[in-house]
Amino acid sequence: MQAKGPNHYSLLGVNRSSSPLDIKRAYKKLSLQLHPDKNPNDPKASSKFDRVKKAYDVLMDMEFREVYNKFG
């Protein structure tokens, strides 16, 4: 049974078979676009950036990624 939650893969624009390097590249690209310092007029910039960072952290840690893939 898979729990409902954020889809870290789609958030970063990668798929489940993406390598750590692909994930890192996607994160770097998004983090540069969404960083609160780059978007001072967007009140949601910080939360968008935090969601991308959390997705990156989960998918880059192989143990967390395995659990996420199994349970969501």
Image: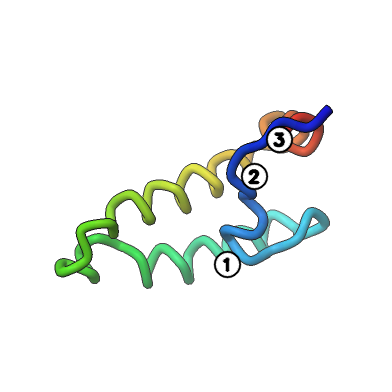
Q: Residue at x 37, y 55 (%)?
A: 49
Between marks 2 and 1 in the image, the one whose residue lies nearer the viewer: 2
Left or right, 35 with respect to 65, comes to left
Amino acid beneath label 1: Arg
The residue indicated by pointer 2 is 59
**Cα gap from disc 1 to disc 3, whole angstroms:** 22 Å
Name the residue tied to disc 1.
25
Residue sitting nearer the eye, 70 or 18: 70
Q: Residue at x 33, y 49 (%)?
A: 47
Q: What amino acid type is highlighted by mark number 2?
A: Leu
What is the x, y in percent for residue 20?
69, 54
Q: Secondary structure at mark 1?
A: helix
Mark whose residue sits in front, 2 or 3: 3
Vertical order, 60 against 63 (above or below): below
Q: Is residue 16 left or right of residue 24?
A: right
Question: What is the C-alpha distance between the residues marked 2 and 3?
Answer: 11 Å
**Badge 2 or badge 1: first in the primary sequence:** 1
Which is nearer the eye, 58 or 42? 42
**Separation (CA) of disc 2 from disc 1:** 13 Å
* Mark 3: amino acid: Gly
Mark 1 vs mark 3: in front: 3
Mark 3 crowdedness (10 Å alpha carbons): few <14, some 14-19, many ≥20 = some
Number of numbered labels in the structure image: 3
Farthest left residue in view: 41
| Residue located at (28% from left, 57% from top) | 44
Callout 3: helix, strand or loop? Answer: loop
In the picture of the structure, the residue carrying the numbered disc 3 is 72
Residue placed at 75% from the left, 58% from the top?
19
Q: Is residue 71 above or below residue 46?
A: above
* Circle 1 Cα neighbour tier, 10 Å, few/some/many (<14 / 14–19 / ≥20): some
State left or right for residue 23 relative to residue 40.
right
